Amino acid sequence: MIMIALHSYLRWLILALFIVVLVRHLFGIIQKKQFESLDKTLSLILTISLDTMLLIGIVVYFMSPFGYGIFAEMGALVMKEAALRRIAIEHPIQMVLAIVFAHIGAAQRKKDILDSTKHKKMFVLYLISFVLILSGIPWNR
């Protein structure tokens, strides 16, 4: 299925974007750099990419066997099978939480605060999001 492949391959773009954004904010903290328009643009691209990935993930979720039928079998099958629970429950929850943290991080770019504080807050929030994504990716796919 094309949507599953797209969902799988886009993760590499998002992970690369995260690394670039995290490194820029880390250098912004260490070298006390100004918050530049490139930082804003990268933040915007990252959040748009995450939102796009979420939409694709929702389509994949409801097109797969884990969609509507999963709720009927929730207690009987899914919650007892670790692999099914991981894909059907844990992965979506982790990814939504990661996107929430990324959006909170992205919102810092609009705040009228010191550039050093902006870099620190964005770095921490994006790092939390990145770790949630890394731990939530089913690497065997």
Image (tube, helix red, strand yellow):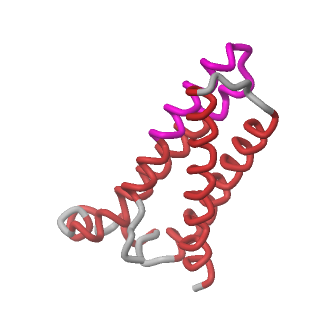
Residue 38: image quadrant is top right
Residue 35 left/right relative to 54 = right
Q: Nearer the viewer, residue 62 or 99?
A: 99
Percent across and percent down for residue 137 are 42, 62
Total tally of numbered discs in the picture:
0
Q: Is residue 34 above or below residue 76?
A: above
Q: Which of these two is toward me, 130 or 92?
A: 130
Q: Residue furthest bottom?
A: 1
Q: In which quadrant of the rendered image does the N terminus lie? A: bottom right
Q: Is residue 52 magenta?
A: no
Residue at 42% across, 55% down: 134
Q: Position of residue 128 (x, y in %)?
A: 45, 39
What secondary structure prevails in the magenta region?
helix
The residue lying at 67 percent from left, 46 percent from top is 47
- Left of 109 or right of it: where is 25? left
Is 105 one of the magenta-colored residues? yes
Q: Which residues are magenta?
A: 104-128
**Is residue 7 or residue 39 the one in the foreground?**
39
